[in-house]
Image (tube, rainbow, N blue to C red):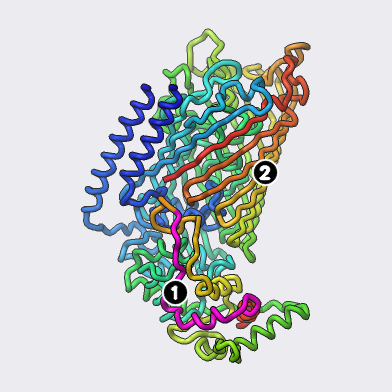
Amino acid sequence: MKISMRISLVSIALSGAMLAGCTYFNNIPPVTTLENPTRSRTLGDYEVAGNVLAVQVCAACHGVNGQSQSPMVPNLAGQQKAYIVNQLQDYRDQTRSNKYGVQYMWGMARSLTDKQIQELADYFSKQVPIQSSKQVEYSAQEMAKLARGKEIFEKGIPGKGVVQCNSCHGFKGEGMATFPRIAGQHAYYLIQQLNVWKDPTQKEFMEVGGKTWAPRTIKFARPHGVLMINEETNLSEADINAVANYLNTMN
Amino acid sequence: MKTIKTLAGALFALFLFGVSLDYAQALPLFSRQTGQNCVACHAGGQYPELTPYGRYFKLTAYTLGERSNLPVSVQFVGGAATSTNGNNGTGQVHQSGNLEPNYLFLDVGGKITDNFGAFSQWYYGFSEQVSGGKGTVPNQNQFAADIQDWRYADHYVGDGTDTIKDFIWGASLNNFAGSTDVWNSSPMWMYPYMGSTRNSSTYGLPFNTRLSSYTVHNPGYGVYGYVNRNFYGEVNLYQSGGSGPLSWMTYPQSNSNPNNPPVYLQGLNPYFRLAYQSDEHAGHNWMVGFLGANINQYSSCNTVSNSATYRAVAPNCSGPVNSPALSAGTVKYQDRAIDSQYQYLVDPHTVTAQLRYTKENISDPTGILYSNPNNKTNSFMSKVSYVYNATYGAAVAFQNITGTSDAYYGTNAATGAYLNPNSTAWIPSIWYQPLQNMRFTYQYTAFTKYNGGTINYNGSGTNASANNASWFYLWLAM
């Protein structure tokens, strides 16, 4: 009895202190906190330059040269500047809501200023994509898959209404303005993105972002990717796999 | 009845905390600071295991993100621990088998400045093992300092043509050897990630090397460097907190608390850690490391305990309590370990594995703690786990220790011979995380050898399996 009394009292005091504290601290105007302006990992401070955030924060996953190590994380080297700007804004506005975007990117982008977004897009779009130098021996099956991917990239699947990728993403998959560079992208990432519209409403038991009190049904969406709805819904799993793997091999 | 009230009190406290947090989002501190999900830093969501990004976050001193308005979060651990083969093992004397609260953690810190941040954990242990038999365990029903890691770090990024493309360096003020580590094969951060206050078997081996989980509990200062995200080196020096300005780091251990004396170390005691971390390739990454510590410990009236927390020895001397016997010499521990970790992290699959092998020499020429002037122990700790969709997980650990017979490890009741520490444990567990910050785990500990034997190891008819334990528990963080 004594213990529960003590706990209750402590928690009431703690809760009260927190509510008071939040009210107090939330009303303090933002102050600059640039103790180390050239090497800051501070988010939510307009004074930190985009190229500082790029190497101190983004590079932790996307690589300092925009070349990421994890297949879940997209390469950003040579990505179209306008595309990066759009996507960062969509993450900030919480309108791009594919699973990993919500889990990883909503928080990173939530307080970026327009200026920082421009600077970040500038930084990564200027990184030179690394040319794959290794010679890979493909099996006949893999060759067939890559050939199928190349066919979809260049010719589409007219019977299914799938437009060829290179009509918007460029002849070399290098992208164009708001159409992203897809050449050399991780196949795993491309497959995830090509499936966003396939099953846009997915129940995620694991809470992704926001409040934690209940599992939510999140609607996967990419507002700047609506042009892809037709392609994505008409591509079979095998074709998605083929085209993603082909794109990964492009330089 | 008392336990029900305690539990009700704890849940009420959590509820109040949740209500007070609601509009600030009921997520743990670091999650609020970065706005990211637990899976960003914790492999498959199985906190406390770290992803490559989680390691970066810790090595850069928890400074990534937005400084929180409310740099506080809490964790609650509670469940039911039971003996599974009769309640007669030496590791099981205290459990009741009822649903009980175990720990309430208070975490403060996070980002403080551009270069300075903290992981500062405090806890309240509910009815932690009480004295009697083997365990006089500190901190029961008492608030106490848990892991402290106050850090300064900076991160230099060169351009692609430099030899050193990336360099993270920093310094830490901490209170457990190994608390600064970012790999889960290290002494402080290895599976099982939680144990019950009511049953020491849930933690695994009854004895371990001096350098293992929660064992070197003294204020320490260290520096570290990480080159190109591949080569890591760290040195820390641990010393007695005593009644000095750093004694808060081992609170409530104090010279005036006979139930909770500090461990007196002689001078500065080095701990070092070297590691090579591979780059990630197609979702795989691995690490190999080497670490060790030299610990020289004074005798004092009730601090001749090895691991401080779970295996302390009851006061049994008549001299002045809690004062180090400076002229009686020291027990010298020299620990050297190799460790390794492997991770595969591509959603929805998470596979991780860790191992650590430690060789230890113990020198006790004046017989402070041991009956032999020299003892050796070797321990092998390992674990492999799989998590699906950061929601469903399973793990199994294998732990083994061997060592020389010594009065320290007990005496055979029938023959009077000294026992040895030789023990082998298997610890399988399964868990379910309905929310990223809520985990239900069922964990089983099976001993195939305990304190030197399998059948009747202590001469009192106790079998190793009598120490087996089940634990079902909830771990909630917000």
Residue A233: in magenta span: yes
The total number of labels drawn is 2
Q: Where is mark 1, residue-wise?
A: A222
Between the residue at mark 2 and the residue at mark 1, the CA separation in whole angstroms equals 40 Å
Residue B163's place in the image compared with B50, above or below, is below
* Residue plotted at (53% across, 23% down): B129
Pair 2/1: label in front: 1
**Badge 1 amino acid:** Arg
Q: Which residues are magenta?
A: A215-239
Type of secondary structure dominating the magenta stretch:
helix
Residue B247: in magenta span: no
* Residue plotted at (50% across, 69% down): A64
**Badge 2 amino acid:** Val
Chain ID at mark 1: A
Residues A27 and B390: in front is B390
Decide if residue A232 is on the left or right side of residue B419. Answer: left
Q: Is residue B139 visible?
A: no
Q: Is residue B395 visible?
A: yes
Q: Where is mark 2, residue-wise?
A: B396
Chain ID at mark 2: B
